[in-house]
Amino acid sequence: MPPNEGFNVEKEHKIINPHKMDLATTNKTKFQAFSVKPKTKEMRKAELSDAPMVAMSSYSAGFPNWKNGKQDIYHEKHPQFPYYSLPFKGNSNYKNNFTEEQMKQLRK
């Protein structure tokens, strides 16, 4: 190419390669497609046991299923506190310890 003629892209893309190109790759020639078959596990039946079992979990015992409000909501009953009926004797600790004489002395 002469020095004053630059690289011309328009001419370069028209160049036809007379040689056939081998477009095969190692992957295309060596790799053979295969399918993976999943292993099947032999299923055994569980032996029936006569061991005792808890009928419900601690979660289901502590938190009842309210069925989204369709069931009556669980309400606790009001606790019953013992009621002691003691007769009032008419005296109090304050009355026994602080007499009118003491109050007069305090006011002086």
Image (cartoon, grey):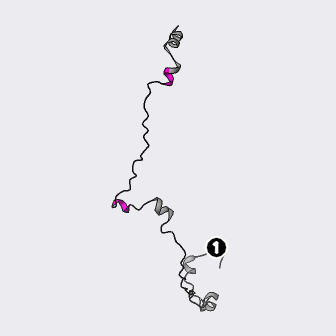
Which of the two residues, 67 or 33, is positioned nearer the viewer here? Answer: 67
Q: Residue at x 53, y 10 (%)?
A: 105
Residue behind mark 1: 4
Q: x%, y% of residue 60?
A: 46, 63
Q: x%, y% of residue 16?
A: 57, 87
Q: Is residue 56 left or right of residue 4?
A: left
Q: Give SS at disc 1.
A: loop
Quarter where residue 25 is shown: bottom right
Q: Amino acid at mark 1?
A: Asn
Q: Is residue 22 visible?
A: no
In magenta, the rendered stretch is 66-95
Quarter where residue 17 is shown: bottom right
Q: Is residue 93 visible?
A: yes
Crowd band around label 1 with a 10 angstrom C-alpha radius: few (<14), some (14–19), many (20+)? few
Q: Is residue 58 left or right of residue 31?
A: left
Total numbered labels: 1
Q: x%, y% of residue 4?
A: 64, 73
Which of the two residues, 5 or 94, is positioned nearer the viewer here? Answer: 94
Q: Residue at x 53, y 13 (%)?
A: 102
Does residue 69 belong to the magenta stretch?
yes
Does residue 56 belong to the magenta stretch?
no
Which of the two residues, 20 or 30, is positioned nearer the viewer here? Answer: 30
Image quadrant containing the N terminus:
bottom right
Q: In the figure, 57 relative to 44: above or below? A: above
Principal SS element in the magenta part?
loop
Which of the two residues, 8 or 63, is positioned nearer the viewer here? Answer: 63
